Amino acid sequence: MTMPRTHVESFDLDHTRVRAPYVRLAGRTDGPRGDRVSKWDLRLLQPNRGEIPTGPLHTIEHLLAGYLRDALEDLGASGAGSELIDASPMGCRTGFYLTLMGEPEADTVREACLRALRAVSTHDGPIPGCSPERCGNWRDHSLPGAVAWAEAVLEEPMIVQETIPIR
């Protein structure tokens, strides 16, 4: 059996030495037309110490889709050429990968994430996109769980985490 040829940056991150909650610039790519795409980690829980259950995680994902775009726009990041392309849950269920067009300042991404999580923590309406027509697993949601997890994450200060490579 052979290993993949492509290098995966996140496998070189020392998950035992980072401190969640955090945002971290995980990589950047320049497209053929000069467009910059940046990948960020939004780590909500300390790696290997717990995970967010799928229902609350799925609901946080749906809510971040709008609230994070709103927060970036409110902070002027979208006017500076930085727009959220996607917020995808990490397979380990400790956070999200954020893909942005452009490369905003780390503090701007951190503040946008805090604003979005505050909005999640107070959300009391319907879950956006939560129907059989709009979601591939619409029954696997938990708004009370999403609110509780967002509240718990917000109890700790969110930092900008530098990449700590495995030694």
Image (tube, helix red, strand yellow):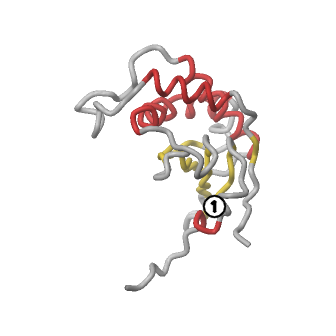
Query: Which residue is the extreme one toward the front?
Result: 49
Residue 143 lies left or right of residue 137; in this view the side is: right
Query: Would you identify the image quadrant in which residue 114 lies?
Result: top right
Q: Nearer the viewer, residue 33 or 163?
A: 163
Judge whether residue 49 can be spotted in this image.
yes
**Which residue was labeled with disc 1?**
28
The image quarter containing residue 84 is: top right
Q: Position of residue 79 (x, y in %)?
A: 65, 37
Residue closer to the observer: 49 or 163: 49
Q: Position of residue 10 (x, y in %)?
A: 59, 63
Q: Residue furthest bottom?
A: 1
Residue 7 position in % (x across, y down): 55, 74
Residue located at (23% from left, 31% from top): 132
Q: Nearer the viewer, residue 35 or 128?
A: 128
Residue count near mark 1 (Cα–Cα under 10 Å), binned few <14, some 14–19, many ≥20: some
In this picture, is 155 found above or below 123? below
Q: Residue at x 45, y 79 (%)?
A: 4
Left or right: 138 as drawn, with respect to 52: left
The amino acid beneath tag 1 is Arg
Please tell me whether residue 65 is drawn above or below residue 37 in the rendered image.
above
Q: Which quadrant of the rendered structure holds the C terminus?
A: bottom right
Q: Residue at x 67, y 51 (%)?
A: 103
Q: Residue 139: image x %, image y %?
A: 28, 30
Residue lying at the far top in this picture: please name it: 124
